[in-house]
Image: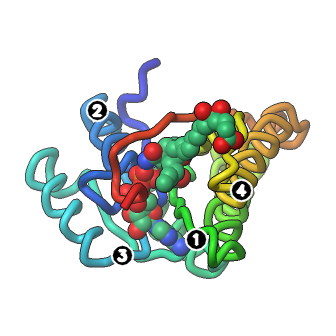
Amino acid sequence: MNIEGKVALITGAGHVMGIGYAIVRQLLGKRVKGVGILDINDENGREVLDILQNEFGEHRVIYVNCDVTSKTDLEGAFEKVKTHFGKLDIVCNNAGIQNEVNWELTLNINLMGTIRGTYLALEHMGVNYGGSGGIVINTASIAGIMTTSHLPVYGASKHGIVAFTRSIASNRTFKENKIRVSAFCPAKVDTPIQD
Ligand SMILES: NC(=O)C1=CN([C@@H]2O[C@H](COP(=O)(O)OP(=O)(O)OC[C@H]3O[C@@H](n4cnc5c(N)ncnc54)[C@H](O)[C@@H]3O)[C@@H](O)[C@H]2O)C=CC1
Ligand SMILES: CCCCCC(=O)CC\C=C/C=C/C=C/[C@@H](O)[C@@H](O)CCCC(=O)O
C-alpha cells in the first residue's frame, strides 16, 4: 500500500523500545508526510522526537503530550496534529498499560482510549466531516483472542478492542465516511510494558 504523503497520528509511541515507536519508524520510512506522536510521558516523548527529527527531518515529526483517558486532551492533540500538517489520514490507537491492581485505569486507557480515538478519527477524517477518509489501526493483543488467566482485566480490555474494531469496521457511518478500521494482535514483544 502506498502511504507516501499521508499524515499519521499515533498514541503511546513515546518510548524507543515500544511497539508504537517501531510503527512510527516504518511510517516515516515509507515516506509519509508527517507523524504526530502522542504520549503521557514527556521525557520519553521528547527523546523519541529528538531521534526521529534528526534521522527523518525536523518537519516530519511532532510530539504532543496527551493522556488518552482525557477526551479534552485527545481532542486537543488531534487538532494540533491536523493543524500542523494540514490534514489527517491514519490514526493508530496504540497506548496501553498492563495493571491488574488499578484495573479501572487499564480499561480506561486500553479500551476506552481506543474507542475515544476511533470516534475522534471519524470526526477528523470522515468525508461527511470535511475530511478525505482514512484508516484506523488499533493495537490489540493475543490476549484479545486467547484466555490469559494471569491477566484477566488486560485480556478483557484487549478482547474489547477486538470486538469493538470488528463491529465498527462494518458500521454504516464509518463506511459512509470512508474510514477503514482494523486491529492487530501481537504476541509477546520485549518492551517496557513487560517490566
Ligand atoms: N509488548 C507486548 O508484548 C505487547 C504489547 N501490546 C500492546 O502494544 C501497545 C504498546 O505497548 P508496548 O509498546 O508494548 O509498551 P510501551 O510501554 O512501550 O508502550 C505504551 C506507551 O503508552 C504510553 N501511555 C501509557 N498510558 C498512557 C496514557 N494514559 N495516555 C497516553 N499514553 C499512555 C506509555 O507512556 C508508553 O509510551 C499496548 O497497547 C500494548 O497493550 C500488544 C501485544 C503484545
Ligand atoms: C506482562 C504482559 C504484558 C502484556 C503484553 C501482551 O499483550 C502480550 C500477551 C500477553 C499474554 C498472552 C498470553 C497468551 C496465553 C495463551 O497461550 C493461552 O492459551 C494460555 C492459556 C492459559 C491461560 O488462560 O492462562
Depth check: give the residue in front, 115 or 111. Answer: 111
Q: Amino acid at mark 1?
A: Val
Residue 152's disc number: 4
Q: Are marks 2 and 1 in contact (CB under 8 Å)?
A: no
Q: What whole-number distance in Å separates the C-alpha atoms at marks 3 and 1?
A: 12 Å
User: Disc 1 marks which residue?
Assistant: 68
Left of 37 or right of it: where is 93?
Answer: right
Question: In the rendered image, which residue does mark 2 sit on?
Answer: 31
Q: Name the image quarter holding residue 184.
A: top right
Say which amino acid is labelled 2.
Arg
Q: CA distance from mark 4 to mark 1?
A: 22 Å
Q: Say above or below: 165 vs 68.
A: above
Q: Residues within 10 Å of mark 3 (few under 14, many from 20)?
A: some
The kind of residue on which mark 3 rests is Asn
> Is residue 9 among the parts visible in the rendering?
no
Looking at the image, do the residues carrying marks 4 and 2 touch, with CB atoms under 8 Å apart?
no
| Residue at far front of view | 150
Mark 4 residue type = Pro
User: Considering only order in the chain, which callout, 1 or 3, is on the residue closer to the N terminus?
Assistant: 3
Which is more foreground, mark 4 or mark 2? 4
What residue did someone put label 3 on? 41
- Marks 3 and 2, the one that precedes in the sequence: 2
The residues bearing labels 4 and 3 have C-alpha atoms spaced at a distance of 26 Å
In front: label 4 or label 3: 4
Earlier sequence position, callout 4 versus callout 1? 1
Residue under the point 9% across and 54% down:
54
- Ligand 1 has an atom within 8 Å of the beta carbon of the residue at disc 1: yes
Q: CA distance from mark 2 to mark 1?
A: 27 Å
Mark closest to the chain's N terminus, 4 or 3: 3
Q: Residue at x 28, y 32 (%)?
A: 31
Measured from the top left, where is residue 129 in percent x and y?
Answer: 74, 53
